[in-house]
Image: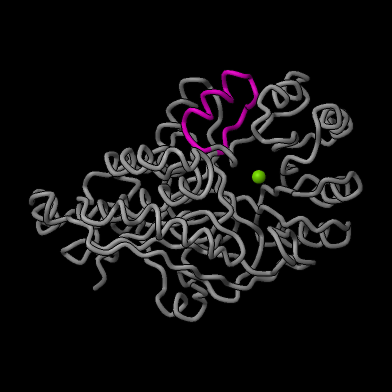
Amino acid sequence: MRISETKGVSFAGLQRLSSSAASHKIVKADAILVSIPFESGGVPPWSFGGAPKLQFDTLLVRLETEQGIVGWGEAFSRCEDKSLKAMIETRVLPLVIGRSALEIGKIKYDVEFRLQNFGRVGPIIYGVSAVDIALWDILGKISGLPLTALLGGAFASEVEVYASLMRYGNCADVVRATRQAIERGYRYIKLHEITEDEIHAAVEAAGAQAAVMLDTNCPWPVAEALKYDRLLEPLNLYWLEEPVWPPENYAGLARIRSTGRHHIAAGENAGSLHDFVAMIAAGAIDIAQPDVAKAGGISELVKIASLCQAESIEFVPHCAIFGPGQVATIHLNAAQRSVPMLERLYCDFEAEIYGGATLPVNGKVAVPTGPGLGLDPDPGVINRYRVA
Ligand SMILES: [Mg+2]
């Protein structure tokens, strides 16, 4: 039986947890890049440099302890991000080897402190995020408890999922995807369109069957964002996400929010708790969207969730990945009193990294109950789609 299939706290698990920290030494740390083709019912949506592709990465970090316990984490990545993998392998992982897996907070602090000059947002913090997720997975496996239990317990056994549609850039495809998502049971749909015709067509297609959010990915200067804020008001969007360029223009976002026409969501491009402190202090957001694979992992998102609670800001994590980062987000969401929705990019993969266990059914996903993340990636899928 795989460790992740065991249930509850076993005596052996307690023994393992109480034994000396040295026995939980991390002896192996690897980055593994998997890239899996998908179908989204339209043209390739985004280019991240080079030609746009119909495939998404899962950049895994695999940590193994002296006792052979394996933890899985994930760094944000997109299309065969080999340079990102190299950065994590050469800078982050060497600082993790030889440490006790039980020192989650200390490892995170030490790695961040030592690598601070490489930037507080971006590849290094993505790597720190992946390590943090993997360490929480190991802690759960050592203790025999699911991540939700380590976070204070689950408020729900399943989490509502919203269909985060690709950017299609034409009315026919976005309308078809909207209708199909509703047929599949989604009650919340997020668009990534930035032109009026497509946005109107999709909102009309959704009708009363789904609430619609709009994520524009930072396309506009403040004056133009204000124009769209006014034009889009009659659509009653559930939220308006990242309308202003650049993403760290919190004062600009606050200008849009101050009209009171839309609930403003942002945060996927932020790097840590303190970015959210600044965002909230500026009056920029109603909804905070930290990404567990970008902003410092589970440990950092727990802090951001507390900040949001204290400031009466909604905490709805960003999630555009499909591996351990998505599973960690399911646990994090389930462990909040508000049980925020899980974001899932609307596409069908050629192969499922968890054999389908994370696929929504009727717009909801089950919260894993096994120790740690409760799910381990399928080694067959990793071998078949590994690119680096
Ligand atoms: Mg977004």
Q: Position of residue 324 (x, y in %)?
A: 43, 58
Question: Residue 28: which quarter of the image?
Answer: bottom left
Task: Judge left or right: residue 80 versus residue 241.
Answer: left
Give the image quadrant in which the ligand numbered 1 is located: top right
Task: Work out whether 33 lies above or below 131.
Answer: below
Res. 73 in view: yes
Question: Residue 245: which quarter of the image?
Answer: top right
Structure colour scheme: one colour
* Residue occupying image coordinates x 76% and y 68%: 41
Q: Position of residue 349 (x, y in %)?
A: 60, 71
Count all numbered tags in the image, as a single digit: 0
Image quadrant holding the N terminus, namely bottom left
* Residue occupying image coordinates x 75% and y 43%: 216
**Was residue 108 drawn as part of the magenta stretch in this picture?**
no
Task: Judge left or right: residue 160 versus residue 189.
Answer: left
Task: Work out whether 387 lies above or below 125.
Answer: below
* Residue occupying image coordinates x 60% and y 55%: 344
Nearest to the observer: residue 66 or residue 345: 66
Res. 239 in view: no
* Residue occupying image coordinates x 55% and y 23%: 278
Q: Position of residue 275 (x, y in %)?
A: 53, 30
Residue at the right extreme of this rendering: 197
Nearest to the observer: residue 324 or residue 107: 107
Residue bounds of the magenta highlight: 271-289
Q: Position of residue 352 (x, y in %)?
A: 52, 71
Residue at the front extreme of this rendering: 117
Nearest to the observer: residue 133 or residue 190: 133
